[in-house]
Amino acid sequence: MKASVRKRRRRMTIRNTERRLVTEPARRRILILAAGTASMPAAARVAWAQKYPSRPITIVVPFAAGGPTDVIARTLADNMRTAFGQPVTVKNFSGAGGTIGVGRVARATPDGYTLSIGQNGSHVTNGEI
């Protein structure tokens, strides 16, 4: 009878240590996450945004000059010039249904200084709208 009592005690102690091993890392994770969350506002204050725009902006129109998209782009460029205080140029690259101009913008460096303007066209077939 003494042997069976000893076995039960061993099993209970093993289970207690297993519980401790399971709960301790969870507590540590919670404390680490809480400390990280508390430090996030301090890290956000350190990062300062750069002044935009600090150099000229280019608007690419993927259609021919003189079209409605070009007129809208030039009007937009004039308003951007006065708002930002930086030169804004409009370049037209027509051909392939706008693919050539959009491709140039896609290959440009992704810094926000090369923009593209497009249009949502409507296609009318057989007189239906």
Image: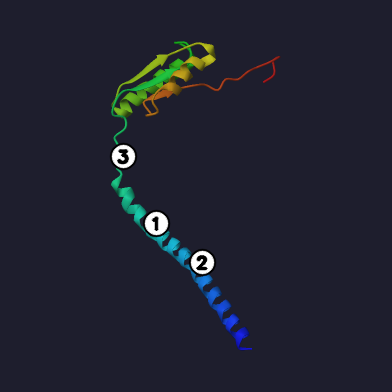
Q: Earlier in the sequence, mark 1 or mark 3?
A: 1
Q: Secondary structure at mark 2?
A: helix
Which residue lies at the image location 31% right of the left edge and 44% below the top edge? Answer: 47
Q: Position of residue 102 (x, y in %)?
A: 48, 20
x then y, percent, for residue 108:
40, 22
Q: Amino acid at mark 2?
A: Val
Query: From mark 2 to mark 1, how far is it between C-alphas?
Result: 23 Å
Of 87 and 17, the residue lying toward us: 17
Front residue of 64 and 107: 107
Q: Which residue is mark 2?
A: 22
Q: Is residue 129 above or below residue 27?
A: above
**Could you say which is closer to the camera, residue 22 or residue 79?**
22
Q: Residue furthest bottom?
A: 1
**Which residue is located at x 39 percent, y 56 percent?**
37
- Residue type at mark 1 is Thr
Compared across the picture, whether 116 is left or right of 82 comes to right
Q: Secondary structure at mark 1?
A: helix
Q: CA distance from mark 2 to mark 3?
A: 43 Å
Q: Select label 1 or label 3 by which is in front.
A: 1
The quadrant in which residue 29 appears is: bottom left
Rendering coords of residue 85 (x, y %): 28, 27
Judge the density around disc 3: few (<14), some (14-19), many (≥20) Cα neighbours within 10 Å.
Answer: few
2 or 1: tag closer to the N-terminus: 2
Q: Which mark is residue 16?
A: none
Q: Are marks 1 and 3 in contact (CB under 8 Å)?
A: no
Q: Which residue is mark 1?
A: 37
Q: Disc 2 or disc 3, which is closer to the eye? A: 2
- The alpha-carbon separation of the residues under discs 1 and 3 comes to 22 Å
Q: Mark 2 near mark 1, Cβ–Cβ under 8 Å?
A: no
